[in-house]
Image: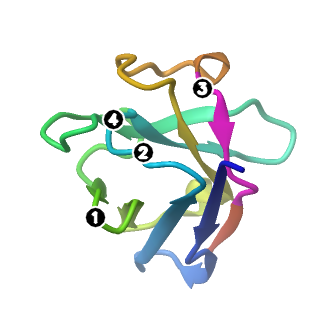
Amino acid sequence: QVQLTESGGGLVQAGGSLRLACAASGRTFSNHVMSWFRQAPGKEHEFVASINWAGGSTDYSSSVKGRFTISRDNVKNTVYLQASSLKPEDTAVYYCAARREYYSSSVLPRDYIYWGQGTQVTVSS
């Protein structure tokens, strides 16, 4: 059974940092684009960042570019999101997601077939 499990969320003050992790099990995700999305209360899922299977290509939303860094360790089957200079507007549930094997990156939630359960990030002002 395929499973994505996020961890690392929590409460942090504005300007602080968190490192989120997404551990995959049930299959190898080395050939899948992996992405992070977030959902604030009352809002739709918002694309945050993506990384291709080799880790050589990344993409970020304009709202996090320069502050967040996505990376992956295919040996550990894990994807990370280093979130720095956090702002109150970054408060949301953060989800990792995977596309079908060998598919290219996408910013659309509907293009992802595997999802984790989410981890809460709360940034206080």
Q: Residue 116 in magenta?
A: yes
**CA gap, disc 2 and disc 4:** 5 Å
Say which element carries label 2: loop
Label whose residue precedes the other's in the sequence (4 or 1): 4
Residue 92's place in the image compared with 124, above or below, is above
Residue 58 badge: none
16 relative position to 74: left or right: right
Residue at the spot of label 3: 112
Residue at the spot of label 2: 29
In front: mark 1 or mark 3?
A: 1
Instruction: Determine the residue positioned at 79% across, 34% down.
Output: 43
Instruction: Determine the residue positioned at 39% across, 34% down.
Output: 32
Residue at the spot of label 4: 31
Cβ atoms at labels 2 and 1 below 8 Å apart:
no
Cβ atoms at labels 4 and 3 below 8 Å apart:
no
Q: Amino acid at mark 2?
A: Phe
**CA gap, disc 2 and disc 1:** 10 Å
Magenta segment: 112-118
Say which element carries label 1: loop
Residue 123 x/y as whole percent: 61, 71
Magenta region's main secondary structure?
loop
**CA gap, disc 4 and disc 1:** 12 Å
Residue at the spot of label 1: 75
Q: Amino acid at mark 4?
A: Asn
